[in-house]
Amino acid sequence: MDIHFQESSQVQETSKIQQFSPKIIGVADSTQYLVGAIDCKNNFVELNEEKRIRCFNSLAQAKDLLRSHQYKTVELEYQSAYDEMCGLPSCDNYKELIQL
């Protein structure tokens, strides 16, 4: 019975890992990039390998962290508050899937 519990636990952990998608968020007019993941509830959270969401001063540094954890692709999203600040309807953020 203990063996079954351990196998079940491993399956749950594997399932949890697979539900995360790595993501880099950049903000317009800023040189900082947030590195984390999107969970199954569409929340921006820390990577499984990290204790917190990481912040870097360059896109190259953000990509290097993901490469060090063996990620092959990442979604890059640029966010801007300009439309909202000007009273215009907000538009979708720019998103791109990049190869590491």
Image (cartoon, helix red, strand yellow):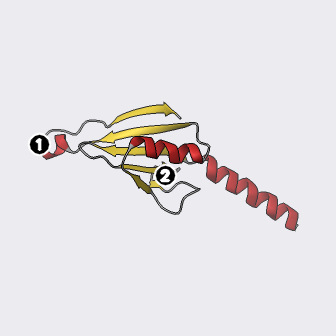
Number of the label disc, if any, that sits on residue 41: 2
Residue mark closest to the camera, 2 vs 1: 1
Q: Is residue 60 above or below residue 2?
A: above
Earlier-in-chain disc, 2 versus 1: 2
Q: Position of residue 68 (x, y in %)?
A: 58, 47
Callout 1, which amino acid? Cys
Helix or strand or loop: what does disc 2 sit on? Answer: loop
Residue labelled with disc 1 = 86
Q: Residue at x 63, y 53 (%)?
A: 16
For residue 62, side relative to residue 4 (left or right): left
Q: Which mark is residue 50?
A: none
Q: Residues within 10 Å of mark 2 (few under 14, many from 20)?
A: few
Mark 2–mark 1 Cα distance, whole angstroms, equals 30 Å
Residue 64: x %, y % from top left: 51, 44
**Image position of 90 with respect to 65: above or below:** above
Question: Toward the viewer: 82 or 54?
Answer: 54
Q: Amino acid at mark 2?
A: Lys
